[in-house]
Amino acid sequence: MTLKKTHLWVLLAACAAAPAFAQNIAVVNGTPIPKARADALVQQLVQQGQQDSPQLQMAVREELVNREILMQEAIREGIPNNPDVKAQIAVAQQTVVLRALIQNFVKNNQPSDAEVKARYDQLTKDAGGSEYHLHHILVDNEQQAKDLIAKIKAGASFEDLAKQYSKDPGSAKNGGDLDWSDPKAYVPEFATAATHLQKGQMTDTPVHTQFGWHIIRVDDIRPVTPPPLEQVRPQIVQQIQQEKLQAFEENLRKQAKIQ
């Protein structure tokens, strides 16, 4: 009778302890390792590209067990009380907390569809204009540029002369081809000269910039076509989120008393 009662109490105790034990993945020298810690590490590894699997779960368990064993030894040696270690722990803790604060702010301050559309409309308006398909030849002195212009006007191939004489390593091998681009991407003197040319025209005189002397030819001009909203939505959302976060930080700083 006594044996049966003892057995019953053991079962009851085991049942009572089961939920608590289920919250730990292991117990090392009496110290439990919470399952939440393992879940956090698994989530971090998954975000880095690893596949969640029983093998990963087991590897995480072994890693955390090893860490706990080493941590207990570090505590035995008094390492956590080292001032430098304390300072590093404080910085690491602050980093984790601030990351969570930022994630929480971003989550609760998502830009609305109206905000995204308004920003897209503004960006497409600012990006309006034309882009040019250009060729150019870059040489070191003005006289050489004038001589090449004369040869081109006399019938010489612009592309052949670019391959032979141009000092621009990026375009010379392609006959001076700069492909399609916004003229504002170039230095001001180059951009001004290019935008004053019509389709098919070449500069009559060399254009001087910090890089040397240019001969510029406009092959074609077309209006800038912005990408559709859905294609650039993620970038716009990120931009607005960063602006809201910056405003949030600046507002907190204004309210803070800094001595």
Image (tube, rainbow, N blue to C red):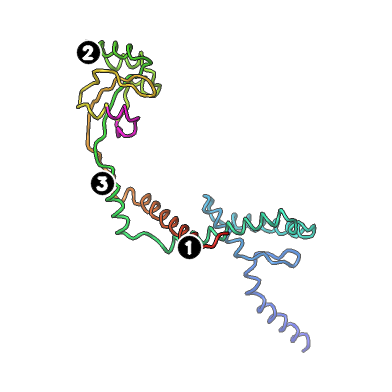
Q: Nearer the viewer, mark 2 or mark 1?
A: 2
Label 2 amino acid?
Lys
Residue highlighted by disc 3 = 125
The amino acid at mark 1 is Asn
Answer whether residue 38 is magenta in the image. no
Residue type (three-letter) at the residue carrying disc 3: Lys
The answer, for residue 175, to whether it is visible in the render is no
- Which of the 4 quarters of the picture holds residue 77? bottom right
**Which of marks 1 and 3 precedes in the sequence?**
1
11 vs 124: above or below: below
In the picture, measured across the screen, residue 45 lies left or right of residue 164, that is: right
Cα distance between the residues tagged 2 and 1: 65 Å
Q: Which residues are magenta?
A: 180-192
Which label sits on residue 104?
Answer: 1
With respect to residue 223, does 96 lie above or below? below
Q: Are the residues tagged 3 and 2 within 8 Å (C-beta)?
A: no
Residue displayed at 78% across by 85% down: 3
Q: The residue tagged with tag 2: helix, strand or loop?
A: helix
Q: Which residue is mark 2?
A: 153
